[in-house]
Image: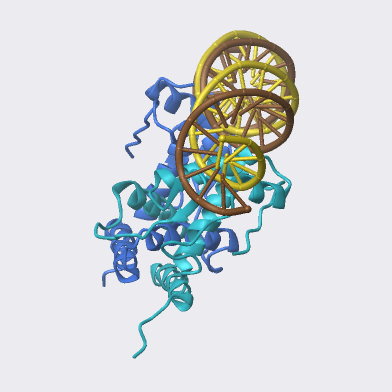
Chain colours: A cyan, B blue, C yellow, D brown
Amino acid sequence: MILNVDLAGAVPIYQQIRDQIVEAIAHGELVDGSSLPPTRTLAADFGINFHTVNKAYDLLRQEGLIRLNRKTGAVVTAAAGDQGPTAEWTARARTLLAEAVARGIPADDVLQTCRTLLDSFGATQQEDMP
Amino acid sequence: MILNVDLAGAVPIYQQIRDQIVEAIAHGELVDGSSLPPTRTLAADFGINFHTVNKAYDLLRQEGLIRLNRKTGAVVTAAAGDQGPTAEWTARARTLLAEAVARGIPADDVLQTCRTLLDSFGATQQEDMP
DNA sequence: CCCTTTGTTCTATTAGTTATAGAACAAACC
DNA sequence: GGTTTGTTCTATAACTAATAGAACAAAGGG
């Protein structure tokens, strides 16, 4: 997995790390059982403090996407997906979609962009081919 | 327009104000030419500082959604919508959608949620009925 | 059993953000 | 002329982001 952090950007570093790992999971690049690098290693790779990586991992743990163990390190946990989107997620989606519509972009175009993004996730995912 | 700010919430107040105005525009509740309350008035309504409202209005001005004039106050500007989603918007959408997919929610369900949200915007909008 | 690896916890510091506060300025309108 | 409105300035307190260093705790390997 290739992470790319922008140290000078507006988005906090720990958030960038968290977001990119989430996207890697969505892409199927990281699956249930995949190991993430130790915090100190990842921090050294980017030349950042390991506390910053720690914060990203802790966020992912709170979201239930990874499990943290001493010695075993950070491991991706399978997503059940038996519930739909949370109210909190839907609220964030509403704001984001509203932003596009308020700019005058037709709803169809916005939905098409979402569809394309979602399709791009499935691309790398393992499909059961007979 | 009814705004609702949560002073104790995790989301900054100026962001809440900005988001709700964006949603009101998307809903068609605020159209081209609609006036927003003066910063001091809105601030007094919520019992917050007018600088905080100022920051929200300034954000909206930077995004091109409102125009600010002395004495005329804040006025909603028409959205051209001749361009599609910006790269920045698409990146945020990718992260948000990835979050749902990583949780194991089927892409179809996610897309359906988006469709429902987008439909809810069109509901209040003025359609040209012959 | 010792030692290394790994996450966990603690204190501390610097820089930036959020929100408040007060004051003053500048233009537009009645 | 005075009121209304956005604009700009300084200041402050509380919180967040990132860095730094140190130490602890458990799990596993040689």
Q: Relative to C2, is A19 above or below?
A: below
Residue C24 picture quarter: top right
Q: Is residue B64 visible?
A: no
- A103 to the left or right of A38: left
Q: Quadrant of the C terminus of chain B?
A: bottom left
Which residue: 27% across, 59% down? Answer: B123
- A8 to the left or right of A39: right
Q: Relative to B22, is D26 above or below?
A: above
Q: Quadrant of the N terminus of chain B?
A: top left
Which residue: 44% across, 41% down? Answer: B35
Q: Relative to C24, is B119 above or below?
A: below
Which residue: 46% across, 69% down? Answer: A28
Residue D17, position as x, y percentages in the image:
61, 37
Q: Is residue A91 visible?
A: yes
Q: Relative to A34, is A92 above or below?
A: above
Q: Nearer the viewer, residue A28 or D27?
A: D27
Residue B52, position as x, y percentages in the image:
52, 28
Residue B19, position as x, y percentages in the image:
44, 44
Residue A91, position as x, y percentages in the image:
35, 48
Q: Nearer the viewer, residue C29 or B117?
A: B117
